[in-house]
Amino acid sequence: MHETESQEDPPPTVPPVADHPYAVFRNADYVRYLVARLISTLGMQMLVTALDWELYKRAQSGLALGFVGLSLMVPMVLCTLPAGQLADRRNRKSIILGSTLLLAFASLGLTLASAFIALDKNVTTFQLCAYTLLVVIGVARTFLWPASAAFVTALVSREELPRAITFNSGTFQLSSVVGPTAAGVIIWLTHGAWLIYAFNVVVGIVCFFLVAGIRHEHKLPPREPVSFKSLITGFGFVYHNKIILGTITLDMFAVLLGGSVTLLPIYAADILPLNGGAGGLGLGILRAGIPVGAVICMFIIAHRPPLQKAGRAMLVCVAIFGAATILFGLANCQCLGRFISAPDTVWFWVAFGLMAVCGAVDNVSVIVRQTLVQILTPDEKRGRVSAVNSLFIGTSNELGGTESGFTAQWFGPVMQRVSEDSPAYAHAMASGAIWSTVVGGFGTLVVVLAVALIWPEIRRYGKLA
């Protein structure tokens, strides 16, 4: 007779380490990288907030604030190609360290300028110093982003990469909530911005030593001569890889058309009154809506297995982003209030909730796009492709703000023929902001449909791992 097989229950299956939501934190190199990323983005959020405040305090000009975005965007446009090339041809860790020191140097310059140039004197001199140092910051960030994005893929396994990118995105969103608030509190207590700039110098030094302690070293590919063809390799790869091209296009136009952050001061002041007038408090709360939603989404995604139908999930989430943007534009007492009776405060918190929804679904889109860019790109091209990704998404943020402001002005005072000195100007500006937001939301839905039809590969893309 044959011996019977054991009837004992088989031992329980132990899930792979990578399946644990926080398994990636057992990787000391990744933890160092993530902590450095968190405090550096926190410091930069504080710095930009403080500099906006100080420039307006000194110059009393909205144009002075407009040059902040321009000073940061121009280096991005001019340096993206060499930054991507450098990230693929030089040690990425060294690039991160050098860029971090350059950011600390620029922060030190702002500290000295703020501390030694009196508020009521030499306004032009301070502006010249500030914009020059912002250009330096823009150059450093342009070289830092592709090197950092490509560097993280070597710190974690392919299975851990989606969760690593999830936590990367979450740290940025968390800093977007904490950074401006912390800067505002410090300015309120000290009535000066130099302390925030000095804090960012310390942050830069700490980040330098955190990254320096990472053991992984980027293995350089065989050296090849620098040529125009090698510089535009990233653009060529993106163009021929339909999935990457489609996801970047989708995210870029969604931000360009559907972003309503630029118009939030109008909503806070004239559309969504909070306790008689939202003002600064309401603006701060509304601005926090998107990052709050993104952080909540980060924890939800971290506790779930990798997306099984990542392409479809991205399309659905961007469509929800567009729909929530439309509802946000309509969630005010003048429009929906005619059909649904509710206190003004309720409408304000409905708007905040819709901003949180936008942040949550946008975070899913960001995670899918960034993960696909990294896993579908060969390592020797990751720097250049990451640079292209940063260029399109970064410039779409700036252009999206310009588009929102222009369309709000067009749909409002221009079409209604209301001058700035008219009592009806604020009402016209408010209606223009609503129209701009609603039209942008519908535009986002059209983009989703177009991308789904033009690049069916995205709809069919499966597991994100």
Image (spheres, rainbow, N blue to C red):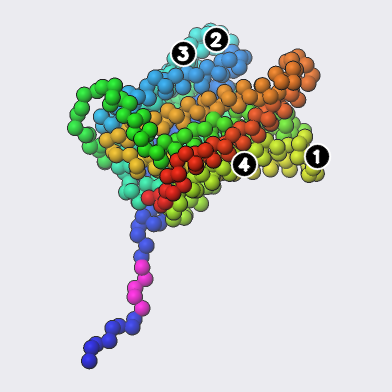
Q: CA distance from mark 2 to mark 3?
A: 10 Å
In the picture, the disc for residue 338 is 1
Residue named by callout 2 = 123
Magenta residues span 9-13
- Secondary structure, magenta segment, majority class: loop
Q: Are marks 4 and 3 in contact (CB under 8 Å)?
A: no
In the picture, the disc for residue 129 is 3
The secondary element bearing badge 1 is classed as helix
Residue named by callout 4 = 323
Q: Residue furthest bottom?
A: 1
Label located before the other in sequence (2 or 3): 2
Q: CA distance from mark 2 to mark 4?
A: 44 Å
Mark 1 Cα shell of 10 Å, populated few (<14), some (14-19), many (≥20) = few
Label located before the other in sequence (1 or 4): 4
The secondary element bearing badge 2 is classed as helix
The amino acid beneath tag 1 is Arg
| Residue shown at 76% from the left, 36% from the top | 335
